[in-house]
Image: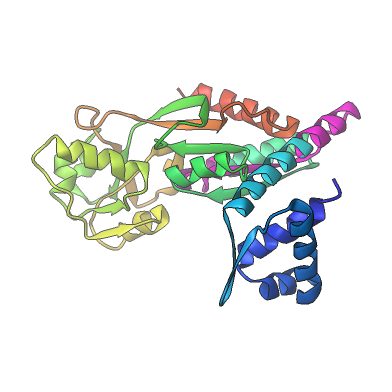
């Protein structure tokens, strides 16, 4: 426990990349911060930072130390959460990494519903692509991840899987808007926008075209699904998204149509945690609630 503040200082320096900048951020003098770190290194028996001409960065020993600290901090939050439950008042902080599609509609509704019953719980929600979300779990930066088509799944313990058929987004005056479902080849024959390579939707589109005769030749690529959806309003083009990130009632002049599963099978939206980790009570209960809601969608 005595080193908790020192670890926070070390983490601050790691993020800032400079002792002076970290000192400014944490309202401490640079000399005092430097002495604190040097004293810790002496007790630890090894330097943890590589001193560079224009700053510092963690060396391999420092990386191992921070991994240990994050694991210990996670265990401490879990114990604090259990203690709060003993008094009948659930508190805690839940960290969640998610795909962009969960940000506009799904997660705001779920978090607000949870906080109505447990107002002492706070949240950190970060948007991450599918590979970065898995790193968030492995480094204890996030308790939970909710992502479309994760990459590795080595340390990813799946709590719930929900199929998601990719949908095409288009204006109402697009000829394909009259169809109940659309073929991928017809979408690619029109001007189209696609996500960048790190996203699951793009990976699935790439796999589909590899089996056919069409190619992806987008008028624009973007890591923002909001940009692509709004761009379609200005040019009669087609964008792609999973349905959990769409709200039919707010689409107005746009329509959404599912891609035929003959061309592209449904992908999986996965809720998960780091394999083998015991979550704090608040995070575990929130995950259980999310799993129930997602299960009702299947």
- Vertically, is 134 above or below 58? above
Quarter of the figure that contains the C terminus: top left
Q: Is residue 89 magenta?
A: yes
Quarter of the figure that contains the N terminus: top right
In the image shown, does 213 or 46 lie closer to the viewer?
Answer: 46
- Vertically, is 182 above or below 50? above
Q: What residue appears at the point 16 percent right and 52 percent down from the top-left corner? A: 190
Counting from the top left corner in percent of width and height, residue 96 is at 60, 42
Q: Would you say 84 lies left or right of 112 here?
A: right
**Residue 272 visible, this orientation:** yes
Counting from the top left corner in percent of width and height, residue 146 is at 52, 37
Q: Which image quarter: residue 185?
A: top left
In the image shown, does 25 or 23 lie closer to the viewer?
Answer: 23
Counting from the top left corner in percent of width and height, residue 19 is at 68, 71
Q: What residue appears at the point 76 percent right and 64 percent down from the top-left corner? A: 38
Q: Is residue 118 magenta?
A: no
Q: Would you say 181 lies left or right of 131 here?
A: left
Q: Would you say 205 lies left or right of 273 here?
A: left
Q: What residue appears at the point 34 percent right and 52 percent down from the top-left corner? A: 253
Q: Which residues are magenta?
A: 77-106
Counting from the top left corner in percent of width and height, residue 83 is at 86, 31
Q: What residue appears at the point 32 percent right and 53 percent down from the top-left corner? A: 196
- Vertically, is 285 above or below 41? above
**Residue 98 visible, this orientation:** no
In the image shown, does 253 or 213 lie closer to the viewer?
Answer: 213
């Amino acid at each position: 426990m005595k080193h908790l503040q020192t670890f926070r200082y070390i983490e601050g320096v790691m993020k800032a990349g400079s002792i002076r900048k970290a000192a400014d951020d944490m309202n401490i003098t640079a000399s005092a911060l430097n002495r604190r770190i040097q004293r810790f290194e002496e007790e630890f028996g090894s330097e943890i930072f590589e001193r560079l001409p224009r700053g510092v960065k963690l060396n391999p020993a420092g990386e191992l130390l921070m991994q240990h600290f994050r694991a210990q901090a996670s265990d401490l939050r879990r114990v604090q959460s259990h203690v709060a439950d003993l008094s009948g008042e659930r508190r805690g902080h839940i960290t969640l990494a998610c795909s962009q599609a969960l940000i506009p509609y799904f997660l705001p509704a779920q978090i607000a519903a949870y906080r109505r019953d447990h107002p002492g719980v706070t949240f950190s929600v970060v948007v991450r692509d599918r590979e970065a979300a898995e790193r968030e779990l492995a480094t204890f930066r996030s308790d939970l991840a909710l992502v479309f088509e994760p990459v590795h799944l080595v340390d990813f313990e799946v709590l719930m899987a929900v199929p998601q058929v990719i949908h095409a987004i288009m204006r109402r005056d697009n000829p394909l808007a009259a169809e109940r479902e659309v073929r991928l080849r017809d979408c690619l024959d029109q001007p189209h926008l696609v996500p960048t390579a790190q996203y699951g939707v793009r990976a699935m589109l790439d796999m589909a075209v590899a089996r056919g005769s069409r190619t992806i030749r987008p008028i624009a690529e973007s890591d923002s699904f909001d940009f692509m959806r709004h761009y379609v309003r200005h040019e009669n083009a087609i964008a792609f998204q999973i349905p959990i990130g769409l709200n039919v009632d707010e689409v107005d002049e746009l329509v959404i149509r599912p891609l035929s599963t003959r061309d592209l099978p449904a992908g999986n939206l996965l809720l998960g945690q780091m394999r083998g980790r015991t979550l704090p009570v608040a995070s575990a209960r929130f995950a259980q609630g999310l799993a129930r809601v997602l299960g009702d969608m299947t």
